[in-house]
Amino acid sequence: MQFQIIPGFLIFLGSYFPLAIILAIQDIPGAWWGGSICTRNQVAAGTCVFVPFDHPILCLIFVLIPAAAMVVVMTMLKSLPFPYVVEVKRAKSTPNEIINYTFPYVVSFMGISFAEPQKLIGFSVFLLWMFAITHKSGQILMNPLLLVFGWRLYEATIGINGVEKDVRVLKRGQLCNGMQNAQTIQDFYLLRD
């Protein structure tokens, strides 16, 4: 199975949910952090600020889109069919290549803000370029957010139809030797017990 553009893009977008949270927090002015907690009188008088962001619409868009993409991806992964049976003969955990996802987080602390649309547009172009590279190279599943949800990356030797293969495996939880149900996506095998 090959990831199509839209599911691949959803996986990519969902992985940047933490970045959206970072950008939203950076959009809260310093004066708000030093303010008092809303009291009943302030709420009644309408003087309490519930929306602390300087750019609330952009913050909402930038947080909700990757959050929704993340939910869709997790739903897709749960609903995938696993039509193949493979035998895992050897497996070792491999570090997830998170360097591609690290650069945008570093960039988020280097002056990107919702107040400067030209920087946001430039950053968006950068992210689209990264998506194109990760999608075309078959690395879209090397996603650090999947680690948060319990998915792990392995290098494994599997037996399928009497043939041994060395493959990359993505599995939720620990990968043990033995029979597993499998699905192939790009250059990865997704396994489940």
Image (cartoon, rainbow, N blue to C red):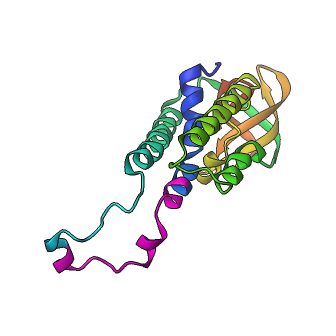
| The one of 30 and 88 positioned closer to us in this rendering | 30
Image location (x, y in percent) of residue 121: 58, 35
Tell me the quarter of the picture where residue 90 sits: top right
Quarter the N terminus occupies: top right
At 56% from the left and 51% from the top, the residue drawn is 113
**Do we see residue 34 in this rendering?**
yes
**Do we see residue 140 in this rendering?**
no
Q: Is residue 4 left or right of residue 155?
A: left
Q: Is residue 83 left or right of residue 114?
A: right
Image location (x, y in percent) of residue 153: 73, 43
Tell me the quarter of the picture where residue 68 sits: top left
Q: Is residue 19 shown above or below 36? A: above
At 51% from the left and 36% from the top, the residue drawn is 73
Q: Is residue 44 left or right of residue 105?
A: left
Q: Is residue 51 shown above or below 188? A: below
Q: Is residue 70 left or right of residue 175?
A: left
Q: Is residue 165 shown above or below 120? A: above
Image location (x, y in percent) of residue 89: 82, 38
| The one of 14 and 132 positioned closer to us in this rendering | 132
Main SS category, magenta section: helix
Image location (x, y in percent) of residue 62: 47, 44
Query: Number of marks in the image?
Result: 0
Segment tinted magenta in the rendering? 23-42
Quarter the C terminus occupies: top right
| The one of 48 and 100 positioned closer to us in this rendering | 48
| Residue 55 in magenta stretch | no
Q: Is residue 25 shown above or below 93? A: below
